[in-house]
Amino acid sequence: MVGDNKPAELRANHDPYGAPPLADDDRVRRTAPSMRTPPSTTKQKALAILIVAIVVAAIVIGALR
């Protein structure tokens, strides 16, 4: 674009209250999460099965009407 060749000080910062733009060499990199999520509990699994059963029942009832 036209403004890409300007020095960092002359580029527009559209958020006057935010942080200044990063220099071209500094990129934000996503870091891998340090902790893994714990496995689902029996209660969570039962709740998920109940929700799926309700949705399937609603679809079947809607189709039979």
Image (spheres, grey):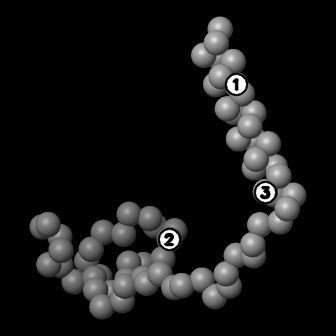
Report the residue marked by disc 3. 45
Say which amino acid is labelled 3. Answer: Lys
Query: Where residue 25 appears, x then y in whole percent?
Result: 30, 91
Q: In which quarter of the image is residue 4?
A: bottom left
Kindly indicate whether the residue at mark 3 contacts the one at mark 1 (C-beta within 8 angstroms): no
Kindly indicate whether the residue at mark 3 contacts the one at mark 2 (C-beta within 8 angstroms): no
Q: Is residue 15 left or right of residue 2?
A: right
Query: Where residue 64 appears, x then y in whole percent?
Result: 64, 12
Q: Which of 17 and 39 is in front in this view?
A: 39
Residue at the location (64% across, 16% down)?
62
Closer to the N terminus: mark 1 or mark 2? 2
Say which amino acid is labelled 2. Answer: Gly
Farthest residue toward the top? 65
Closer to the N terminus: mark 1 or mark 3? 3
Secondary structure of the residue carrying tag 3 is helix
Distance Cα–Cα, label 2 vs label 3: 42 Å
From the image, state whether disc 1 or disc 2 is nearer to you: 1
Q: Residue 58 carries which label?
A: 1
Residue at the location (76% across, 47% down)?
49
Closer to the N terminus: mark 2 or mark 3? 2
Distance Cα–Cα, label 1 vs label 2: 48 Å
Q: Quadrant of residue 55?
A: top right
Residue at the location (75% across, 49% down)?
48
Placement of the N terminus among the 4 image quadrants: bottom left
Q: In this view, does 63 lie to the left or right of 9?
A: right
Say which amino acid is labelled 1. Answer: Ala
Crowdedness of circle 1 by 10 Å Cα count: few (<14), some, many (20+)? Answer: few
Q: Which mark is residue 18?
A: 2
